[in-house]
Amino acid sequence: MKNIKSSKQIIILLIAVFVSMASFAQEISRNRGPQVVSPEIAKDNSVTFRLYSENAQSVAVNGSWMNMGETLEMKKGEDGIWTVTTPSIEPSMYHYNFVLDGVRILDPTNPQAMRDGRRYSSTLVIPGEGSEFIEVNDVPHGSLTKVWYDSPTLDLNRRMYVYTPPGYADSDEKYPVLYLLHGGGGDEDAWTSLGRANYILDNLIAAGKAKPMLVVMTNGNPDQTVAISDQKMKSAEETQAGGGPMTMGSKDFPNSIVNDVIPYIEKHYRVLTNKDNRALAGLSMGALQTQITGMNNPELFNYLGVFSIGLQMEFGDTTTDLIKAYDTNLDVLKNNGFKLFYIGVGKEDFVYEGVKLLRAKLDEYDFDYIYNETEGGHTWANWRTYLSDFAPRLFK
Amino acid sequence: MKNIKSSKQIIILLIAVFVSMASFAQEISRNRGPQVVSPEIAKDNSVTFRLYSENAQSVAVNGSWMNMGETLEMKKGEDGIWTVTTPSIEPSMYHYNFVLDGVRILDPTNPQAMRDGRRYSSTLVIPGEGSEFIEVNDVPHGSLTKVWYDSPTLDLNRRMYVYTPPGYADSDEKYPVLYLLHGGGGDEDAWTSLGRANYILDNLIAAGKAKPMLVVMTNGNPDQTVAISDQKMKSAEETQAGGGPMTMGSKDFPNSIVNDVIPYIEKHYRVLTNKDNRALAGLSMGALQTQITGMNNPELFNYLGVFSIGLQMEFGDTTTDLIKAYDTNLDVLKNNGFKLFYIGVGKEDFVYEGVKLLRAKLDEYDFDYIYNETEGGHTWANWRTYLSDFAPRLFK
């Protein structure tokens, strides 16, 4: 008995030592005060958020399941813990912030966060049918590599992500490639951090829904070497994210895909190198770049995905030029085995009218396309949905 | 003149449209109120922090250049902007939080942040001699891959990072490998996000100081498939980070390095597969795992790096077993071409006494080692320094 007792004491001592070590080992300190649980997802998919602050004047939640600009006020208990419980939320992936005395902050007890341009939000995944396809499930996972490549077209050495599917490292097979472009204000991190593209592909491939493929995610801002989160610190003026008019209308980035990115990938990876095995898709700014690249290079891609942009008349010359490219090449594409033109847009998206014009242009040439009109607007929830609907249609 | 004027008007219109699009394209909204610049680094390396909040009761800064627990109060101006300017800060990489009415938050205008376990902090890099080796400089960059691998030893499919040096993809050469382990509370993200290991290697290789090598960064918590930031959301109790006593003392993770990780790397990468071309290093918990793995497998590594831990008597049986392994194998190592035993520790580190015992043990066997005693304590500033001093000594 004596021995057993003393081992127990040793274990308790050890636990005390290690707990103190673990907190030392982490340099970033905890909040003081009571530990709270937040977010807490109930069985009915309502969510309780909590924040401890004795001194705050007001705390609210703003989440991507709410309407734009809407917030939910939190109420302070006698213990200094501010709380609110939402109604039931649809299964999906969301982001949210607390607004503490007017300042947008992360939920300090939630270890999952995402960056959109210069801003961070906490992540909320409501489990269920609308979120299974973006979860890290117990399925084979592809690899995700941050690759630096030379872009003579942009005169930069710059970074992109390359997803290789499960099995790539153990096979001699050659794979098709999806080139996937982010939107204005985003960068090469966006499609994996906000978009979960790698996990979406893992899940689609595991379910037998999508063919194993590479996914190449570039930085669409032609003046950036790397996402702002990895750049040398500069003044605020220097570090504006891309996505301005010169960026979006310019052919520099589309040309760099053709001249720099595709050759790099086809040299360094085991991939199939014909247009039957190349797809190009993008969201918003990336969907404009997809149209510019695809329509001006009809020999390159047999699959195009245009998410949440169309022929936007407000883009002036850029759209005029793009319409010319459609007029020149839609028949060329049709007569040369083009496989899939995919359009996704939300009913409330501010680009909706431009998408109507794009559909009219395709109809004018009797050019087949798949049109996926969803609820909502210009949101990552939609872009994740479009990718998960688009990828299974590729390379078949 | 008329044409010129109207193009100008079109450009102005375009800019207005695109600016509004860029803000739409980013779902995570800006703070309301005046835009402030923070952090602002002056030429004398003093730093001004700013936060806009009309309603806050108190705002302070807490940064890793300060003493533990210290904060710097910010003062509110009539414009609702809270401000403080620090004294001059030594060039290095730091992390900091604002403490807003008692809640630790990110600096909302700083796009660079890092995660340590469950907590996020903003990043501050003071440029100069102490930070050049961790910056993203204009040098060739290696690739960084998140790889999933099977660990039969741990009965998990799990994730690690593999850094391949610049030139790897374009050569047929075989490279040596450094296996690099994180500390308690960390995970496979830690050495690249907090530690900047990939950029440190890029810079050392570009300067001709380190040989091109692979760096393999595992998750040292034997119950985790993947960092908490990528896990399915669970209750707070379920998601405790590893690093408890069972984890740190157990041989499960060291065995998984030997049985699962090294074989995976040597099968899937062009690497040299003898002990002259394998190094193992770690910080804190990872330095304990380094000693356990290295001392029990004297045939595997000719280079060991032990950062910020030693023979800690408070670890009981774990340390007793480790001392036995030293007594059994130090002479074996010495007589079989062992190259480098490297110890790094800060003068104020709470493990300092254990490191003294480790040195005494090595001295007892007249076993050579390099001892780097630095200022400070159990900090990432030290671990980045040790890596940048250790890597150039490898494989030579």
Image (spheres, coloured by chain):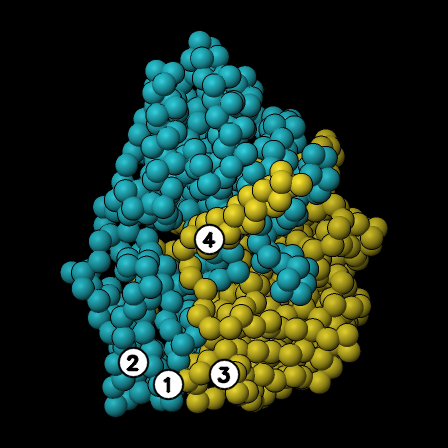
Chain colours: A yellow, B cyan
First of labels 2, 1 by sequence position: 1
Q: Residue A20, labelled with which disc?
A: 4
C-alpha gap between disc 2 and disc 1: 9 Å
Count residues near mark 2 (Cα–Cα under 10 Å), then give few for <14, some for 14-19, many for 20+.
many
Three-letter amino acid code at disc 3? Gly
Three-letter amino acid code at disc 2? Trp
How far from the left and from the top, in percent, is residue B335? 44, 9
Residue A243 visible in the current orientation: no
Residue for badge 3? A80
- Asked which secondary structure carries label 3, the reply is loop
First of labels 3, 4 by sequence position: 4
Closest to the camera, between mark 2 and mark 1, is 1
> Dividing the image into 4 quarters, which one contains the N terminus of chain A?
top right
C-alpha gap between disc 2 and disc 4: 34 Å
Q: Residue at x 60, y 68 (%)?
A: A123
Q: Nearer the viewer, residue A34 or B198?
A: A34
Task: Tell me, yes or no, whether dots 2 and 1 are on the same chain.
Answer: yes
Q: Residue at x 63, y 53 (%)?
A: A179
- Asked which secondary structure carries label 4, the reply is helix
How far from the left and from the top, in percent, is residue B197? 43, 42
Q: Are marks 2 and 1 in contact (CB under 8 Å)?
A: yes
Closest to the camera, between mark 1 and mark 3, is 3
Residue for badge 2? B82
C-alpha gap between disc 2 and disc 3: 24 Å
Three-letter amino acid code at disc 1? Ala
Task: Using the rendered view, name the quadrant where residue B24 is placed.
Answer: bottom right
C-alpha gap between disc 4 and disc 1: 32 Å
C-alpha gap between disc 1 and disc 3: 16 Å
Chain ID at mark 4: A
* Left or right placement of residue A47 versus residue B73 in this view: right
Closest to the camera, between mark 2 and mark 4, is 4
